[in-house]
Image (spheres, rainbow, N blue to C red):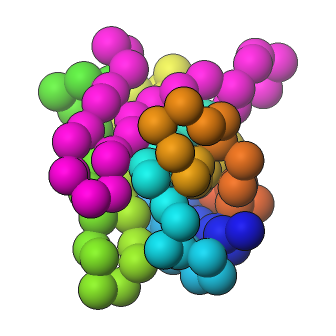
Amino acid sequence: QVQLVESGGGLVQAGGSLRLSCAASGRTFSRYAMAWFRQAPGKEREFVASIIWSYGSTYYAVSVKGRFAISRDSAKNTVYLEMNSLKPEDTAVYYCAARGGATSKYNDWGQGTQVTVSS
């Protein structure tokens, strides 16, 4: 199992930027990919971005492509989400997740960090 701890959320005005961090510990050697998801009030959790840990390949939801960037620091076992040009509709709790294989589900989750974008 991988333990994940997110940080970096907060309140920002529309058009602003935030950087989220997710520190991983535990069975990090078994990690294939890490991702960010988000859940807004009254909505289902949705995929935001992911990164294949060994290759660095990245994937994004259409709604954030060009504005958000996911990256990782292998030495620190940390994944980041740089969020730019934030919009009120980006307001949500952001969760970090990890999965152990290419066909595995995301089974390890962090506690979430709140991002609020004011108009």
As drawn, 61 above or below 2: above
Residue numbers of the magenta segment: 39-63
Hey, which residue is sitting farthest bottom in the picture?
75
Q: Position of residue 37 (x, y in %)?
A: 57, 37
Give left or right: position of 62 versus 94.
left
Task: Depth check: give the residue in front, 64 or 57.
Answer: 57
Task: Depth check: give the residue in front, 14 or 58.
Answer: 58
Q: Position of residue 5 (x, y in %)?
A: 63, 72
The residue at the point 21 percent across, 42 percent down is 57
The residue at the point 17 percent across, 27 percent down is 66
As drawn, 67 above or below 19: above
Q: Kindly tell me whether residue 104 is visible in this rendering.
A: yes
Task: Depth check: give the residue in front, 8 or 13.
Answer: 8
Q: Kindly tell me whether residue 13 is visible in this rendering.
A: no
Count of picture labels: 0
Q: Position of residue 52 (x, y in %)?
A: 32, 47
Tell me the quarter of the picture where residue 46 sits.
top right
Queried whether the magenta region covers residue 10, the answer comes back as no
The residue at the point 22 percent across, 32 percent down is 67
